[in-house]
Amino acid sequence: MKNLSSMLKQAQQMQQKMADLQTALEAAEVDGSAGGGLVTLTMSGKGELKRIRIDPSMANPDDIEVLEDLIVAAHKDAKARAEAYAAEEMKKLTGGIELPPGMSLPF
């Protein structure tokens, strides 16, 4: 019975650590950029878009397609960085044990 009690206590501690990690991911911010920094997006560690910064030189109606492409590329970069950040934080929480394929933090 003592073993079961210990396991339940560890499970509760892990659950609390996961909740703390979720809160930390919501507060964390990562940047992604494209075009040498002409477009920069900021996302939370959970993948929520927070800010978009566009260099004024990109505000040319004749180059709108370039701007659109840069926004998509910056989003892809920011999302990859947010996912890498979340994976690194999860690795710290689990003591380096990686989650099985298909299991990840919700975005």
Image (cartoon, helix red, strand yellow):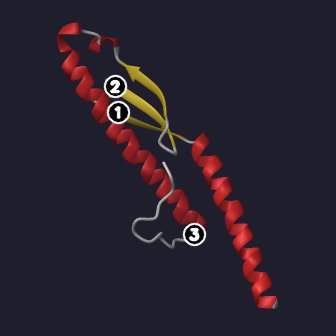
* Dot 1 crowding, Cα within 10 Å, few <14, some 14–19, many 20+: many
Distance between the alpha carbons at the discs numbered 1 and 3: 30 Å
Query: Residue 7 — which label?
Result: none
Q: Earlier in the sequence, mark 1 or mark 3?
A: 1
- Image coordinates for residue 24, horizontal then vertical, percent: 63, 48
Look at the numbered disc 2 and give the secondary structure of its residue: strand
1 or 3: mark nearer the eye: 3
**Camera-side residue of 80 and 4:** 4
* Dot 2 crowding, Cα within 10 Å, few <14, some 14–19, many 20+: many
Dots 2 and 1: beta carbons under 8 Å? Answer: yes
Position of the N terminus, as image quadrant, is bottom right
Q: Amino acid at mark 2?
A: Val
Q: Amino acid at mark 1?
A: Ser
Residue lying at 52% horizontally and 65% vertically, measured from the top left: 91
Q: Amino acid at mark 3?
A: Thr
Query: Residue 94 — which label?
Result: 3
* Dot 3 crowding, Cα within 10 Å, few <14, some 14–19, many 20+: some
Query: Which corner quadrant of the image does residue 32 belong to?
Result: top left
Distance between the alpha carbons at the discs numbered 2 and 1: 6 Å
- Image coordinates for residue 62, horizontal then vertical, percent: 17, 9
Look at the numbered disc 1 and give the secondary structure of its residue: strand
With 28 as the anchor, is 3 left or right in this view? Answer: right
Q: Earlier in the sequence, mark 2 or mark 1?
A: 1
With 48 as the anchor, is 71 left or right in this view? Answer: left
Q: Is residue 35 visible?
A: no
With 64 as the anchor, is 98 left or right in this view? Answer: right
Look at the numbered disc 3 and give the secondary structure of its residue: loop
Residue assigned mark 1? 33
Q: Earlier in the sequence, mark 2 or mark 3?
A: 2
Residue assigned mark 2? 39
- Image coordinates for residue 4, horizontal then vertical, percent: 76, 86
Distance between the alpha carbons at the discs numbered 2 and 3: 35 Å
